[in-house]
Amino acid sequence: MIDSPKAIKILIDAGFDIDTRDLAGYTPLMKTNSQEVAQLLIDAGADVNATCISPTPAQQNTDTVLMITESPDIVRLLVKAGANIDAQNIMGDTALMNTESLEKIIALINCGADPYIENQFGWNAFNMIREYCTDHDAIEYYLKEIEPRYAPKLSASATKNELGNVQKQINACIEKGLLIQAPKPALTNDSFTDNQ
C-alpha cells in the first residue's frame, strides 16, 4: 500500500479506482496507516463500510475497514464519514470485539460503539476483552472505566449469556454423543415430604 499522500493524490487525479482490492481482498482504505491518506481516500468517495472480500471461500474474512485499522485517528475519520461503528463480520464480531489496542478501544467507545452487541457465540466486547486481550492497560481501562458505566445492564446480560453459552455447549455435546441426556425424574408424593 502506498502511504504517500502525494502519490495517492496523483492516483486519484488519474482516475484510480479507490475501492480496488489487492489479492487478499483489501481496499486501500483498509491498508493505510496514514490519517492524511485515509482522509484523501474518504474525500474521493472510498467506501467506509467496505468489507474484506476473501479470495477463497475457506478464508471467510468479512472484516470491515473499522475492524482492520488500528489507528484511533482513522477510526474517528471513518465514523465521521458514516462508517457503521457496530457492523459485524461473518462471526458476528464488531470492531470493539476485535481490538486489543487501548487507544482504539477508547476511540470506539467515545464514538459510540455498543459493548453489548453479541457475536454468534453470545459473547460481547466485555467477554472478549476478559478472555483474549493481552494488553494490560486495555484490560485495566475496561475494568475501571467501561464496566462500571455499564455494570447494571452488563451483570444481567452476562448471567443470561453465560447460562445460554453453557446450555449451547451441553446441547452440542449431547448432539455429538459425548453426553447422554438423563431422563427427568418423575415427581411423586414422596418428593414433597418433610425431612423433619
Image (cartoon, grey):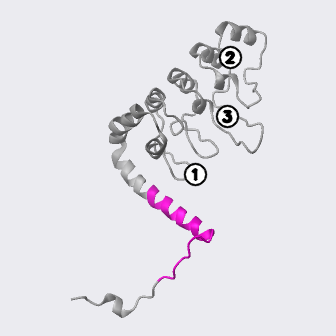
Mark 1 touching mark 2, by CB under 8 A?
Answer: no
Circle 3 SS class: loop
Q: Secondary structure at mark 2?
A: loop
Q: Amino acid at mark 3?
A: Thr
Q: Which mark is residue 44?
A: 2
| 176 relative to 104, above or below | below
> In x, y percent, where is residue 19?
73, 24
Badge 3: how crowded within 10 Å, few (<14), some, or many (20+)? Answer: many
Q: Quadrant of residue 177?
A: bottom right
Q: How far apart are the alpha carbons under marks 1 and 3?
A: 18 Å
65 to the left or right of 154: right
- Distance, label 2 to label 3, CA atoms, is 18 Å
Residue 51: mark in rendering:
3
Q: What x and y, as percent, mark residue 194?
A: 25, 89
- Span colored in magenta: 161-184
The quadrant in which residue 81 appears is top right
22 with respect to 150 (left or right): right
Which of 94 and 153 lies nearest the eye of the viewer? 94
List the residue tagged with mark 1.
120
Between discs 2 and 3, the one toward the N terminus: 2
